[in-house]
Image (cartoon, grey):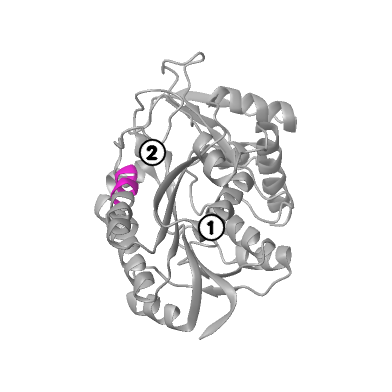
């Protein structure tokens, strides 16, 4: 057994948020061990991470549904904690592949947690989502908002949160923190890692950057008839660097906390799609031609956080601006295009 270092199992560690978490874990003197099946990531991210951190990183090309492997890796490492990012995450796709989403996102997570408990690992940080709130009753959204999703992906997150909540009642020694993300954008300041989805992107910032790079002619804006000032959907965009610092704060908090906790990670203010496009254009001096089209199934008009509980409990607050988000996103995409 390896026990000299604080090993943290990071599932989905080569994905967008997972890779940034790995970089920050190393920066904070943890030793990450990555599991990623490369279904929505690329092994080049590992090389970039190692160059960025000047560290040789443990990586295993595996699926969290490979339970024999999960048992094996827990026998090889004495894990301090688990950060769980792995899973399918497209809202639109979750309607089409509902059973597969449940199998990976819910059943896969349950099996991972069971193995964790079998090996007396007590700290679990779960990658949840603001989609658990569905169409919110009030804004900004706080953690007391009833959980009700408008799509199968969001329901997956609710199912896992409920499982973890029940689990903490019967297991008094575990520390489970569910971090409900709002809309992560941006990239590492170095430009060495960022959002790099395989196939057609689902998130707004890669789509904007594809137009900026000339890989797409137009940006499609889904919905211009919402009850907002400019008709486009409003979201709480948070820089991925702030987001992963929230994970580190949660991980450190586990040392003085037992039980279940759910916290919002957001900035606390909403930005419309049109406002985001305009900010990108103004900061990066690039025009983004777009067309307005119909709403996507499962989308809601306005979503932004009340992040006060995370500040009160973790001492965490988002610090980077929308300008930082669009600037770092473009820096990453521009450098990536130069190197391909």
Q: Is 156 in the magenta?
A: yes
Q: Is residue 2 left or right of residue 192?
A: left
Per the image, label 2 sits on a secondary structure element best described as: helix
Q: Is 104 in the magenta?
A: no
Residue sitting at 49 percent across and 73 percent down? 79
Farthest left residue in view? 99
Residue nearest the observer in this picture, 14 or 176: 176
Can you tell which of label 1 and label 2 is closer to the viewer?
1
- What type of secondary structure mainly makes up the magenta span? helix
Sequence-wise, the earlier of marks 1 and 2 is 2
Give the x, y percent position of residue 138.
39, 23
Q: Is residue 157 left or right of residue 292?
A: left
Q: Which span is picked out in magenta?
A: 153-159
Residue sitting at 61 percent across and 27 percent down? 277
Residue sitting at 39 percent across and 62 percent down? 174
Per the image, label 1 sits on a secondary structure element best described as: helix
**Residue on which disc 1 sits:** 251
**Is residue 234 visible to us here?**
yes
Give the x, y percent position of residue 312.
54, 39
Task: Examine the image and state in which quarter residue 59 appears.
Answer: bottom right
Residue nearest the observer in this picture, 30 or 283: 30
In the displayed structure, would residue 171 be above or below residue 17? Answer: below
Farthest bottom residue in view? 1
**Residue on which disc 2 sits:** 131
Give the x, y percent position of residue 24.
64, 58
In the displayed structure, would residue 21 be above or below residue 96? Answer: below
Q: Is residue 334 left or right of residue 218?
A: right
Give the x, y percent position of residue 218.
56, 32
Residue sitting at 65 percent across and 47 percent down? 187
């Amino acid at each position: 057994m390896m026990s000299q270092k604080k090993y943290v199992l990071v599932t989905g560690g080569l994905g967008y948020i997972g890779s940034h978490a790995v970089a920050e874990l190393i920066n904070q003197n943890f030793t990450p061990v990555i599991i990623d099946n490369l279904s929505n990531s690329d092994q080049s991210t590992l090389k970039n991470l190692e160059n960025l951190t000047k560290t040789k990183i443990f990586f295993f090309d595996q699926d969290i549904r490979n339970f024999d492997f999960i048992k094996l890796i827990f026998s090889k490492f004495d894990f301090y904690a688990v950060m769980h990012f792995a899973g399918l995450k497209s809202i639109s796709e979750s309607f089409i592949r509902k059973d597969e989403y449940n199998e990976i996102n819910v059943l896969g997570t349950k099996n991972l947690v069971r193995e964790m408990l079998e090996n007396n690992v007590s700290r679990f940080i779960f990658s949840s989502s603001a989609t658990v709130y569905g169409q919110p009753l009030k804004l900004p959204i706080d953690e007391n908002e009833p959980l009700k999703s408008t799509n199968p992906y969001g329901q997956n997150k609710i199912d896992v949160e409920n499982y973890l909540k029940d689990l903490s009642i019967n297991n008094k020694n575990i520390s489970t923190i569910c971090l409900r993300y709002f809309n992560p954008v941006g990239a590492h300041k170095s430009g060495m890692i960022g959002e790099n989805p395989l196939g057609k992107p689902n998130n707004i910032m890669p789509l904007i950057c594809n137009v900026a790079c000339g890989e797409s002619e137009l940006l499609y804006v889904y919905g211009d008839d919402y009850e907002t000032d400019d008709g486009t959907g409003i979201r709480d965009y948070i820089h991925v660097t702030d987001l992963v610092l929230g994970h580190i704060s949660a991980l450190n908090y586990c040392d003085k906390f037992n039980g279940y906790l759910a916290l919002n990670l957001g900035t606390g203010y909403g930005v419309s799609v049109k406002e985001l496009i305009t900010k990108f254009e103004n900061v990066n001096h690039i025009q983004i031609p777009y067309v307005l089209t119909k709403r996507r199934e499962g989308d809601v008009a306005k979503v932004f956080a009340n992040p006060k509980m995370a500040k009160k409990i973790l001492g965490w607050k988002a610090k980077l601006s929308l300008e930082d988000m669009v600037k770092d996103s473009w820096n990453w995409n521009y450098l990536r295009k130069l190197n391909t």
